[in-house]
Image: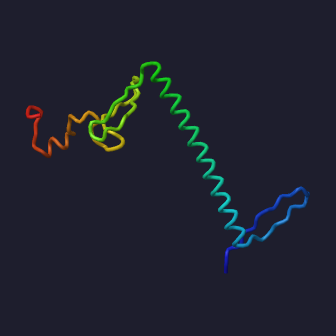
C-alpha cells in the first residue's frame, strides 16, 4: 500500500484532468522546487548584504560607526555608535573581549578575585 499523489495539471485547454505522478516525477518536482528555493534564498542574501553595506557606509559617513580591532584574533569589527543600540565588547569571531582587558564576573568569581584585587 503506497501513497498516491495526484497533481492537477493546468494547460492551455479548459479541461483540467488529474494525473497520477510517478516516484521519479515526484523526485524531479521536489528537486526542482529545492533548487528554486535555494536560488530565492541566494538572491535574498545578496540583497541583505547590499543593504547592510549601504547602512554601514551611511553610518560611517555620519561618524556613527566605530572600527575596532580585536585584541585576541586581530579581526576588524564595525560597531554602530547609535543611541539605544547595545554595544557588546565580545568579539563575534572568537568570543573574547575585543579590548582584551577584562574578565567576566564569573571568571573573576571563579578565580576568587574581588574588585579591589583586579
As drawn, the residue found furthest toward the front would be 74
Provide residue 79's location: percent of width, then percent of height.
Answer: 39, 30
Q: In screen coordinates, is 118 left or right of 5?
A: left
Q: In screen coordinates, is 5 left or right of 69?
A: right
Q: Is residue 86 above or below residue 113?
A: above
As drawn, the residue found furthest toward the left would be 117
Residue name at image x 23 percent, y 36 percent: 100
The structure's colour scheme is: rainbow
Q: In screen coordinates, is 92 left or right of 52?
A: left
Question: How many numbered discs, if any?
Answer: 0
* Closer-to-camera residue (5/48): 48
Q: In screen coordinates, is 36 left or right of 9?
A: left
Provide residue 44's location: percent of width, then percent of height.
Answer: 59, 42
* Closer-to-camera residue (9/29): 29
Provide residue 47's location: percent of width, then percent of height.
Answer: 58, 38
Name the image quarter holding the N terminus.
bottom right
Q: Is residue 113 above or below residue 25?
A: above
Provide residue 28's location: percent of width, then percent of height.
Answer: 69, 65
As drawn, the residue found furthest toward the top would be 62
Q: Is residue 103 above or below residue 85?
A: below
Say which quarter of the image contains residue 112: top left
Residue name at image x 37 percent, y 31 percent: 86
Say which quarter of the image contains residue 118: top left
* Closer-to-camera residue (42/29): 42
Residue name at image x 37 percent, y 28 percent: 67
Amino acid at each position: 500500500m503506497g501513497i498516491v499523489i495526484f497533481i492537477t495539471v493546468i494547460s492551455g485547454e479548459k479541461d483540467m484532468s488529474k494525473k497520477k505522478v510517478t516516484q521519479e516525477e515526484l523526485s524531479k518536482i521536489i528537486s526542482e522546487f529545492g533548487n528554486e528555493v535555494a536560488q530565492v534564498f541566494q538572491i535574498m542574501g545578496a540583497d541583505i548584504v547590499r543593504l547592510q553595506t549601504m547602512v554601514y557606509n551611511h553610518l560611517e559617513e555620519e561618524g556613527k560607526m566605530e572600527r575596532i580591532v580585536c585584541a585576541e584574533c586581530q579581526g576588524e569589527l564595525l560597531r554602530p555608535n547609535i543611541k539605544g543600540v547595545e554595544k557588546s565588547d565580545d568579539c563575534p569571531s572568537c568570543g573574547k573581549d575585543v579590548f582584551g582587558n577584562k574578565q567576566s564576573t564569573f571568571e573573576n568569581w571563579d578565580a576568587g578575585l574581588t574588585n579591589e584585587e583586579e
